[in-house]
């Protein structure tokens, strides 16, 4: 290729599709809540946004066609391994289309399991593709625009939705129904989209204390369950989780990780035996830290992210002291 040809070559962008509302459809254009998810394939998603071809040499790949509640550990591992392989080559960036309900879990997982300066962007939609004012097409085009933009390098995994750029490590779904479904609580957004132009608030940076887990060759991860904290919680569900094979448990506890008296006593016993129990907060915002004999505080992580962190830590057989450091 000559220099002049190279200067006109568009960057190679891979779009990996997994399903969700962005690929959802309904017989009615006004149906935004009873539609079917994951009905449209990647070719249809790309064909609906012809502008994509003006900004990148786009390649689509269907990884799964599921509601994001059915994203399995196997799919997560496949995505991380594929990104590692493809981004080591001449692919410039990756976009992943995903259901919004568990998008933050995949974004967080990939934040911990990929190591590249190239942008990896997750995107979803709150309205199915058939709806009036569907948000998926613009979200996808904006995600692709960020992915191929020179300012997007060295920022780790990101999410682009609703004209905003969020950190894949910090974003979380905070609204069930409306297009402004995500927030980066405490940390804030990374930037704003003005049309197709990303405006970043900061120079490239990574979340502090973000560990990297090499998952090449992995086929599964240890089981970690989440239980909920509420008034007078007893120990039945915690014990059932362990009997059922959980290798660690996250408690989505009240306030700053508080527990009922019986649950706290059981957590103390399990901690003394070296069994990892992480205490997160159902309040959504805050930093959770607890005494060392009473489990492990989840720090800034919510329960679903703490679960991902624990699965990865246990897979590489980290001890309790090492696990504690991941949540600081
Ligand atoms: N429950 C579906 C999912 O997460 C729909 C939510 C969405 O994509 O907005 O795939």
Image: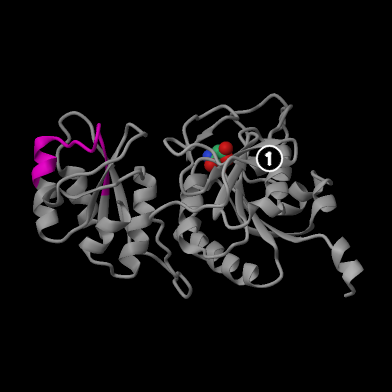
Instruction: Look at 63% across and 72% down and name the residue there.
Output: 88
Residue 84: image location, x then y, percent: 57, 69
Work out whether residue 289 or residue 246 is closer to the camera in this orientation and state it: 289
Provide the residue span drawn in magenta.
250-265
Magenta residue check for 245: no
- How many dots with numbers? 1
Task: Check the picture and name the quadrant holding the N terminus.
Answer: bottom right
Q: In the rendered image of this protein, does residue 46 appear above or below residue 138?
A: below
Residue 3: image location, x then y, percent: 88, 71
Q: Decide: few, some or many residues near mark 1? Use Cα within 10 Å; few <14, some 14-19, many ≥20.
A: many
User: 137 left or right of 126?
Assistant: right
Identify residue for label 1: 139
User: 107 left or right of 93?
Assistant: left
Q: Determine whether the residue tagged by mark 1 lies in a helix, strand or loop.
A: helix
Instruction: Look at 8% across and 44% down and name the residue there.
Output: 265
Instruction: Look at 45% across and 39% down and name the residue there.
Output: 187
Residue 111: image location, x then y, percent: 49, 56
Magenta residue check for 258: yes
User: 122 left or right of 15?
Assistant: left
Furthest-front residue in view?
203
Instruction: Look at 29% across and 70% down and name the residue there.
Output: 317
Residue 246: tell me if it is visible.
no
Q: Tell me the quarter of the picture where residue 162 sits.
A: top right
Ligand 1, seen in the image, is in the quarter at: top right
Q: How is the image coloured?
A: one colour
């Amino acid at each position: 290729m000559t220099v002049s040809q190279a200067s006109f070559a568009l960057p190679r962008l891979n779009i990996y599709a997994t399903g969700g509302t962005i690929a959802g459809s309904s017989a009615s254009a006004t149906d935004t809540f009873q539609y079917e998810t994951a009905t449209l394939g990647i070719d249809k998603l790309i064909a609906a946004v012809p502008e994509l071809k003006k900004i990148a040499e786009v390649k689509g790949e269907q990884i799964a066609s599921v509601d994001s509640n059915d994203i399995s550990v196997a799919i997560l591992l496949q995505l991380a391994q594929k990104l590692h392989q493809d981004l080591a080559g001449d692919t410039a960036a990756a976009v992943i289309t995903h259901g919004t309900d568990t998008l933050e879990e995949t974004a967080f997982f990939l934040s911990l399991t990929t190591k590249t300066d190239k942008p990896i962007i997750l995107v979803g939609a709150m309205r199915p593709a058939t709806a009036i004012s569907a948000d998926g097409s613009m979200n996808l085009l904006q995600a692709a625009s960020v992915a191929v933009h020179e300012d997007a390098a060295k920022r780790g995994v990101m999410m682009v939705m609703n004209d905003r750029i969020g950190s894949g490590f910090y974003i979380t779904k905070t609204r069930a129904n409306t297009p402004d479904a995500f927030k980066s609580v405490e940390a804030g957004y990374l930037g704003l989209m003005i049309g197709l132009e990303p405006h970043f608030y900061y120079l490239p940076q990574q979340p502090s204390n973000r560990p990297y887990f090499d998952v090449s060759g992995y086929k599964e991860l240890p089981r970690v369950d989440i239980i909920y904290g509420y008034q007078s919680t007893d120990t039945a569900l915690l014990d059932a989780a362990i009997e059922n094979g959980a290798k660690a448990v996250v408690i989505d506890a009240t306030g700053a990780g508080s527990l009922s008296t019986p649950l706290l006593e059981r957590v103390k016993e399990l901690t003394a035996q070296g069994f990892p129990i992480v205490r997160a907060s159902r309040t959504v915002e805050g930093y959770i830290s607890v005494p060392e004999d009473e489990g492990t505080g989840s720090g800034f992580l919510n329960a679903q992210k703490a679960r991902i962190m624990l699965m990865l830590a246990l897979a590489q057989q980290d001890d309790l002291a090492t696990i504690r450091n991941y949540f600081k």
